[in-house]
Amino acid sequence: MKNIIPNLTKTINNIKTTAMKNLTYLVLIVCIFALSACGGKKKDPLTTKKEQLKKLKVQQSKINVEIRKLENEIAALSAETNKDKVIPVITKTLTKREFVHYIQVQGVVDSDKSIRVSSETGGQIKNIYVKNGQFVSAGSTVAKVDDALIRKGLAELEQSLDFVKINYEKQKQLWDKKVGTEIEFLSAKNQYESLLRKKESLEEQLAKTTIKAPISGVVDNIFLKEGEMAVPGVPILQIVNGSDVKLVADVPETYSASIKRGTVVTVKFPALNKTVQSTVINVGEVINPSDRSFKVEIALSNTEKLYKPNMLATVEIKDYEKKDAVVIPRNAIMKGEEEEFVFINQNNTAKKIAIKTGVNYQGETEVLSGLNGTEQLITVGFQDLADGQKIEVKL
């Protein structure tokens, strides 16, 4: 009995130890699975980048608020420091005038009369009658495809046709006299008419071996040489009529409501160092889903033959215009926490005016409210001014 109790106690302790070890292993396994479940699902790179950008934008917004706050505090301290000083400034007397806004896009010269000429029948090219740069008239022959087989077939058909025609005429004469059977007459007639149709078909094929210019213009490129094979649909040469050109440009859909037929445009050709005024002659009805743009066509007069198809141009399209607008330099505007403002000269005293701005273009801003267009706007020296500060206008 004395040995049984210690042994039993030892056995129980071993069981407890084993159970604790198993429990520990179980907890470790559960933790590993939990960590795998949490970390196993990786975010895709796009989502990660978007989250990073979102965080940076939030930081940027907070920094901008702090910057504006510091700028206002600096301005206030500067104004307090300089309140007894007379600040030299430069002013500009405002007047109402026309304000125009343009958008800038790239355009390409295009021609509706740029045609690639191909053969309607296959065969070896026997002759090309034109050269690059040569002017051709519509309907003139520019190339010739080998027609020997067609002519041979046509000659054989004409011999057969002569015999069939004689047979048909004799059968007709007999039938008119009620001699012979109707089947013999109709068979001769059908054979004759069938050969006539074959002859017409061969003559059409023969005519297609002569390739003619569909439009008047200049031969811009010759793709095949004499002796090479012409294939239907494959171009042999290209003819361009440069007198009828237009400019085509892709415009962002943002401006779809402001650009119409007749809209004024300025076209600049860097290669020619030339600028011309023109108008929009056509506005596309469909938005391209790939770049969210629509096409516009602009009239071009090419009497001097300066513009060539695929030539690049910069297009400035007028999308906004106001006749009597108050316009001020963009760099004369200051920003507060909740408003934009400028300083004007009022009896040699700086006056702070809150304004509401509109469209910006080439360093100028349209003022919608706050100014009437007769003020003396302070354009230089306004950074250190406070409302009511004494100023000295320098010329």
Image (cartoon, grey):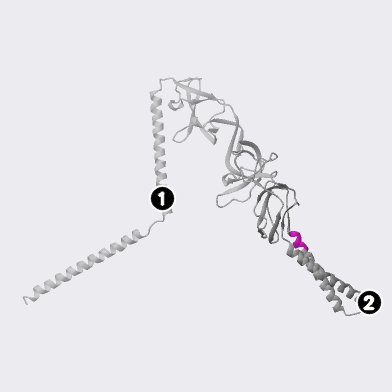
Task: Name the side, left or right, on which 152 lies relative to 94.
Answer: right
Across and down, in percent, residue 198 comes to: 78, 68
Q: Name the secondary structure under disc 1.
A: helix
Residue 190: image x %, image y %?
82, 73
Please tell me whether mark 2 sits on a helix, a strand or a loop.
loop
Q: Is residue 20 above or below residue 140?
A: below
Residue 206 among those drawn in magenta = yes
Eye-nearest disc, 1 or 2: 2
Instruction: Choose between 70 and 362: the one closer to the eye.
Output: 362
Q: Residue at x 75, y 64 (%)?
A: 150
Q: Quadrant of the N terminus?
A: bottom left
Q: Residue furthest left?
A: 2
For label 2, count other residues whose C-alpha is less than 10 Å away and answer few (under 14), some (14-19) or many (20+): few
Q: Which residue is mark 1?
A: 51
Residue 344 lies, with reference to residue 292, above or below; the image says: above
In the image, 33 versus 273, the foreground residue is: 273
Q: Which residues are magenta?
A: 203-208
Q: Specify the quadrant of the image occupied by residue 258.
A: top right
For marks 1 and 2, the one nearer the N-term is 1
Q: Residues within 10 Å of mark 1 (few under 14, many from 20)?
A: few
| 43 sits to left or right of 180 | left
Amino acid carrying mark 2 in the image: Lys
From the top left corner, tell me how far across and down residue 291 is, in percent. Answer: 55, 50
**Above or below 137: residue 382:** above
Query: How far is the residue under mark 1 from the one under mark 2?
Result: 101 Å
Q: What residue is shown at x 20% (from left), y 67% (from top)?
A: 21
Looking at the image, which is closer to me, 36 or 217? 217
Magenta-span inclusion, residue 257: no
Residue drawn at the location 56% of the way across and 49% of the way down? 292
Residue tagged by mark 2? Answer: 177
The residue depicted at 40 percent of the width and 47 percent of the height is 55
